[in-house]
Amino acid sequence: MYVFENPVLQRELLVNLRMPRGFVLLFLYQALLATVVYFAWPQDSRLDLTENPSDARKLVDMFFLGQYILASMMAPSFAAGTITGEKERKTYEMLLASPLRPAAIVLGKMVASLTHLAVLVFASLPIVMLCLPLGGVSLYEVLAAYLGLIVSVITFGAISVACSSFFKRTSASLVVSYLLILPLAMIGVLTWYWLSDFGSLRLLLTVTVLPVVGLAICIALLANTSSRLLHPPDVGSEGNEVVDLEVEARDAVGLVIQRDQFPDRLFAPGKREDLLEDGANPVYDKEIRSEIFSQGTLMLRLVIQVSMVLAIPLMAVCLYIWSQYAAWYISYVVLFNVLVGPVFSAGSVTSERERETLDLLLTTTITPYQILSGKLIAGLRVSTVLTMFLLWPVLLACLMVSSYWTNLHCVAGYLSIVLLTCLTTATVALFCSVLFQKTATSLMSSYLVIIALFCVPLAVNFFATEFFASHPATEYVEWAGLTSPFAASFAIPLDMELVPSDDPDAKLGNWQMYGAYVAFTAALNLFLLSIMVWLFNARWRVAK
């Protein structure tokens, strides 16, 4: 009933493993890993395996860390919609009414969602085996690394399935899953990197401590999710589609959103009780007052609480103790917006399609520009205000830490980077919402585009610097970072021993990178907005 005769598991496996995207994803995953190993392979005509095994260890470590990060990012995309998908398809109550035990449903959903990811992981074994003859790493370390990878993926899958049981939309489940998983993934990456010189200790921790911790987390989450399905609080004969925010605020545990008080009304204004003003945009008013918060504020409250908890140690270390690492805190703020920003815009147009109200909206007298600008500004307002909550420590540091008094122009640059990131994530998400039919597809596409813009250039630059440091083209690869706010943040030359004060050329080059990022981002957002208006006029708008 739990594994071999589990109908949920059998059905999910048949559907997931037969979809064309599975084969495409497997090919792309293998091609990416094979490309990394191919270009990082030692280029010497004669290779002495006993002279410098550290290069081989560095290659294997980078291979596993890259695979670990990819698997961590893909786990929520497979598992975060397992239960919310049933709710969105209106089959959740029928599933609960079946004779299956809740534990069998949860286990079947989780195993089926992670099976394809397990295929990707095991399919990379032949590639890593090619690195073993280089020396520097033993077969036992490789097997231990794969054990740690599998345990981590299962743990991340359990977290995603648990989040899926708490929300009604896949988008909310996905962003909360990422917000919980990314800190754990970063801890795993840093631990593996810091223990690279202590192979025996790393092997021991991977084989003993990590499986025990992962098993304990999985058992606790599966038990909690099963009990939630046994006594589901989100089903009933009334079938409410819209949550009563006043009731939710009264029953909420922890943070409560008060829409009539400051600063909550900045991102969650109350429902309108009077007539709309003349000349106001009705699409914006509907989105910001009703649409975004129609499913309740649980996701919003969790995002605020988790982000604040993670920000406290980071701001203490990066802003007040060692101020020269301020760019790391700005990168955390940017990463927070990357996770949260697309959620409020990726469903702006797809939700109209899913409700079959897009045609009705397009036949009104509201222009395409008003429709798009209203939806964009509404999502941008919420994501920007939430992101600004993490920036008040920066402004406080400008008053308390004297090192910032001579670097106010750099702080202004940091603020501009964060604001441009908010605009970019919201615009890209709205663009994907215009192109695709489903909100889940739009959200995942938004994340992929943003990762390609923000993170891929950094990975390429790191790879080129690490393995092709002497190549003449390596110095130009750095300029690929003009699309990334992370590169722009670290390019701003704080006068705190990050950039030597007697090196004006380096400072000029850093400011040039910042200027290139600002110019590229402004052009990209203007281009995407223009394309969206053109699409609405040419493809969906009825000709006059």
Image (cartoon, grey):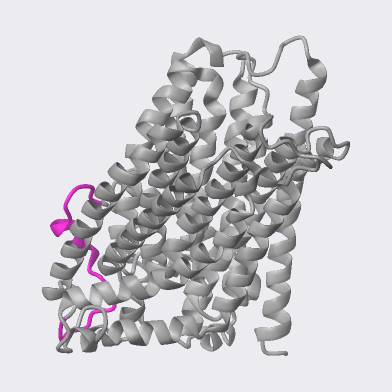
Residue 105 lies in quadrant: bottom left
Residue 291 appears in the rendering: no
Q: Work out which quarter of the rendered image holds the N terminus and state it.
A: bottom left
Is 292 or 343 nearer to us in this picture? 343
On the image, the x and y values in percent for residue 494 come to 63, 20
Kindly identify the residue that appears in the image at 31 percent across and 79 percent down.
87
Residue 300 lies in quadrant: bottom left
Kindly identify the residue that appears in the image at 34 percent across and 66 percent down.
274
On the image, the x and y values in percent for residue 7 come to 28, 88
Is 503 or 213 nearer to us in this picture? 213
Overall secondary structure of the magenta section: loop
Q: Work out which quarter of the rendered image holds the C terminus and state it.
A: bottom right
Left/right of residue 362 with respect to residue 314 in the rendered view: right
Is 349 placed above or below 11 here?
above
Is 266 or 522 nearer to us in this picture? 522
Residue 20 appears in the rendering: yes
Is 20 placed above or below 140 here?
below
Kindly identify the residue that appears in the image at 47 percent across and 24 percent down.
318
On the image, the x and y values in percent for residue 325 come to 54, 24
Residue 249 in the magenta stretch? The answer is yes
Left/right of residue 449 with respect to residue 176 in the rendered view: right
Kindly identify the residue that appears in the image at 64 percent across and 54 percent down.
130
On the image, the x and y values in percent for residue 330 come to 53, 34
Is 26 or 248 nearer to us in this picture? 26
Left/right of residue 213 with respect to residue 493 in the rendered view: left
Residue 294 in the magenta stretch? The answer is no
Magenta residues span: 236-256
